[in-house]
Amino acid sequence: MTRGERVIAFIERYCCVPEGKHVGKPLRLMAFQKRFILAIYDNPAGTARAYLSIGRKNGKSALIGAIALAHVAGPEARLNSQIISGGRSRDQAALVFKLMQKMVRMSPELSKITRIVPSQKQIFGTAMNVEYKAISAEAGTAHGLSPVLAILDEVGQIKGPYDAFVEAIETAQGAHDAPLLIAISTQASADADMFSQWLDDAKASGDPRIVSHVYSAPEGCAIDDREAWRAANPALGEFRSLQDVEDMAEQAKRLPSKESSFRWLFLNQRVEASAPFISRSIWAECGTPVTNDWTGPVYAGLDLSEVSDLTALVLVTPADGIWHVQPTFWLPGAGIAEKARADRVPYDLWARDGYLHTTPGKTVDYEFVAEHLATLRRDMDLRRVAFDRWNWRHLKPWLERAGFEPEELEGDDATFVQMGQGFQSMSPALRDLESVILNGKLAHGGHPVLTMCAANATVKADPAGNRKLDKMKSHGRIDGMVALAMAMSVAGTFQDNSVAFDALALIA
């Protein structure tokens, strides 16, 4: 048997499927996985670097884990050697370790010849004294290591041509005569990003020591092109769910916000992951008049500005099976005409017509915001206010002066609720907002400032498909949409079948 054949035989003999519908069954490698392994280990020139670029959920992490185990306790184990797998975040790094841990514990044979240290994310191969360790860029743990094998997971997330974490790993491998670096990831979004440069260099140089296998849909293909799906997802119909791809493709056809992320994550195309959140036409369909009855429960989102920018407060209330929207915006009064010219937005006219409030001076005075919130609390059933914690320290003293009690500002039952702006917090909020918009359960009345924010709003996706509104990539102010998403997030606590969020409606 060749080296590659021995690695394949080891994986299929001793490794089990760590999770999913086939959990516990012997791991049977697919043809594309075998080709990758054979190309690495049976390369006559010797392999220094190996790249596998493929759509998400095609078994990348499980393959990483199985290959690593072949070096820890299998035919590639070398005496007193060190193996690492690296991820951009602690969670990503831990994912590979957890899959390896599961595979070891499901194998009586591997359990006998390995030792697991969960607290350190380490696995030791006792027969050859091999150490495996999962490391992350967040933890800064690349220095001081000397791995003969380094496996990088989702290196396509790295923006730009350089990364200190990766460089530290590459440098650490310099002590070995024949080190191996394996990178398995979806495509990077831009040509200038590091993984794109690696793939392009492998293609252009023809270096025989570089193995590069890229599974990507043809450029310009239709979203619903099933052959394109298969080109980027060789595990489609096996452990890559066909139904999931069908559902995501249907969403991407309907929603501009989904197309870029679908092409990136599912078609493995090199595209920017930012995209419009909602189309103008769909937003316009929700421009029906807003109710005058605000006696029911009211929820709010507050996006506090940085000094001189737009501050947005958006209220929502359920009425007649619809979520009705009432936004309030503030800008500094000083220099508003100049800001209107600079941004090419009629702030001054909106202020004149009552769609925008101005505060004295060159910065937004949070006293006005606090007093407005105090009035709302007095006149409405204000249940929850979600806010960006970044400027909370400046707003809180004014809320206290406006009469809010300490238990209203902090605690489990507080009116004010901190909400982050990252993927973890914003992704479910955007799903809720998207659901009510698509189902025609939102009425915004065509408010011009909020409509501007909706037109400007773009979303950015991470490799897991989570999304957030991206202020950096958006073309103009989006504060009103951020506040609306936050409001809908806390409004999710309201229970009423007529206006409840229906995530399944997105894939119906």
Image: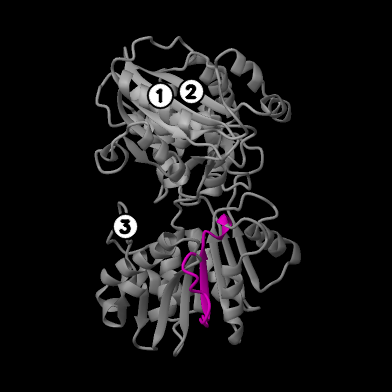
Q: Between disc 1 and disc 2, whose residue precedes?
A: 1
Kindly check if marks 1 and 2 are in contact, taking CB atoms under 8 A apart as contact: yes
The image quadrant that residue 308 belongs to is top right
Q: Distance between the residues labelled 3 and 2?
A: 48 Å
What number is the disc on residue 64? none
Residue at disc 2, secondary structure? strand
Q: Does the magenta stretch include residue 192?
A: no
Judged by depth in the image, the label closer to the viewer, 3 or 2, is 2
Residue 149, percent across and down?
52, 77
Residue drawn at (58%, 43%), measured in percent from left and top?
273
Q: Does the magenta stretch include residue 140?
A: yes
Residue 402, percent across and down?
37, 31
Which residue in the protein does label 2 denote?
A: 328
The image quadrant that residue 403 belongs to is top left
Which residue in the protein does label 1 denote?
A: 315
What number is the disc on residue 19? 3
From this view, report whether residue 295 is shown above or below residue 494. above
Magenta: main secondary structure: loop
Query: Colour scheme in the image?
Result: one colour
Q: Distance between the residues labelled 1 and 3?
A: 43 Å
Q: Between disc 1 and disc 3, whose residue precedes?
A: 3
Say whether residue 242 is visible. Answer: no
Residue at disc 1, secondary structure? strand
